[in-house]
Image (cartoon, rainbow, N blue to C red):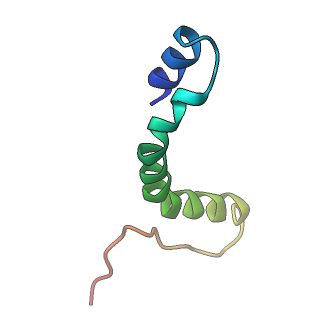
Amino acid sequence: MVGGFMFLLLFEGGRSRYLIQYLPVLLIQASLSLKPAIFRIRRLFTWGSDKILDHPDAQSEV
């Protein structure tokens, strides 16, 4: 993704009109990484406290 962005910005005259073709892939990647990002942010702000957060991808055993 970053390589594609850099290529288009460098070789297409620095204009961002061709970057719209990366928008669907960027939105899919953002939606897939939202849950882990929220978990990491919560873990960062609760660091040092006794509160234990379960990882969002962890399977609970019944």
Asked whether 27 or 11 is in front, the reply is: 11
Residue 21 image position (x, y, % from top left): 45, 36
Q: Nearer the viewer, residue 22 or 51?
A: 22
Residue 48: x %, y % from top left: 71, 62
Classify residue 41 by image quadrant. bottom right
Specify the quadrant that holds the C terminus.
bottom left
Residue that appears at 57% across and 74% down = 52
Measuring 51% from the left and 18% from the top, which residue is drawn there? 8
Q: Residue at (55%, 73%) from the top-left corner?
A: 53
Left or right: residue 24 versus residue 44 is left
Total marks shown come to 0
Most distant residue in the front direction = 17
Q: Report the side of 9 relative to 27 (left or right).
A: right
Quarter placement of the N terminus:
top left
Decide: is 15 above or below 1: above
51 vs 1, nearest the viewer: 1
Q: Nearer the viewer, residue 22 or 45?
A: 22
Image location (x, y in percent) of residue 20 = 52, 37
